Amino acid sequence: MVQVDRSGTIRLRIINGATATAFTVDLGALEGTLIAVDGQPVVPMSGRQFPMAMAQRVDVRLQIPSQGGSFPILALREGAPERTGIVLATAGATIGRLSVSGDQAGPILDNVLEAGLRATAPLAQRPADRTFAIDLAGSMQGYAWSMPGAEAIEVRKGQRVEITMRNVSMMAHPMHLHGHHFQVVALDGRRFAGPVRDTVLVPPMRTVTLAVDANNPGRWAFHCHHLYHMASGMMATFTYEGVA
Ligand SMILES: [Cu+2]
């Protein structure tokens, strides 16, 4: 339980720190405003449910009603009834006991919300200097995963880089690049000025393109944040030329 003030404004920053589980944050009776993803501001979007893949963060602004009360903020497990969360409560409010299992399975994550997000500070408009096309491949049978096309991602400082990730598997992959924030610039080939972030979900059989300015020389991990996928093949690097 987290005590809050009547009529108070709350900023919740939620991190999906799970190894292999996606969630949907459910605000219950409260309406919230999504104001940032992965710590990067987005054009505010109101809603009651926000999907979160592994490693993703959301910042949600909430208004506590003047009459007060208790307000469960739940994280619904994808495709299963289990849930967890916190309760925001004003002084003296009655707090009911909640089951760890809901009535129905949590939503399967897709990119519907992603398509509606817009960065407040998008990357400058410019053509890509380097483009890479990679597949996200593998299967549950044998549990071997790979990122063909990502073996040799090598860039130069100052370049605009675009990476198109095509998921040819039947599992979703939250793809995470270290050392940078990128902008999501296309979903299934449709261009848009999407959010700036560092982890983007690529659902099964879908394609996501990210754009990134190579401005932080090093040898950076670029991987699926489903840690069992990462450990069994979905790990690549984003390397600057001349960096060992
Ligand atoms: Cu994965």
Image: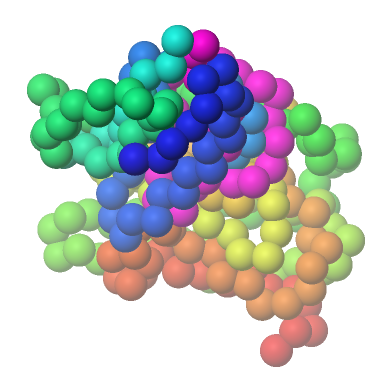
Identify the residue at horizontal 51%, vertical 11% (top origin): 66
Considering every residue shown, the one lying at the far bottom of the view is: 244
Toward which corner of the image does residue 10 lie, by quadrant?
top right
Toward which corner of the image does residue 244 lie, by quadrant?
bottom right
- Provide residue 195's location: percent of width, then percent of height: 66, 34
- Provide residue 122's location: percent of width, then percent of height: 79, 35
Task: Give 195 or 161, whichever is nearer the viewer.
Answer: 195
For the stretch drawn in magenta, what is the main secondary structure? strand
Q: Is residue 212 visible?
A: yes
Above/below status of 241 relative to 16: below
Q: Is residue 230 left or right of residue 236?
A: left
Above/below status of 131 relative to 64: below
Q: Is residue 33 left or right of residue 81?
A: right
Residue 59 among those drawn in magenta: yes
- Provide residue 120's location: percent of width, then percent of height: 77, 30
Identify the residue at horizontal 68%, vertical 30% (top origin): 42
Task: Give 26 or 88, whichever is nearer the viewer.
Answer: 88
Residue 50 among those drawn in magenta: yes
Q: Quadrant of the N terminus?
A: top left
Considering every residue shown, the one lying at the far top of the view is: 67
Q: Is residue 133 left or right of residue 43?
A: left
Identify the residue at horizontal 56%, vertical 70% (top origin): 221
Task: Give 189 or 1, whichever is nearer the viewer.
Answer: 1
Colour logic:
rainbow
Which residues lie in the magenta part? Answer: 38-66
- Provide residue 210's location: percent of width, then percent of height: 64, 44
Above/below status of 213 relative to 217: above
Q: Is residue 208 visible?
A: no
Q: Is residue 191 left or right of residue 97?
A: right
Toward which corner of the image does residue 107 lie, by quadrant?
top left
Identify the residue at horizontal 14%, vertical 38% (top origin): 100
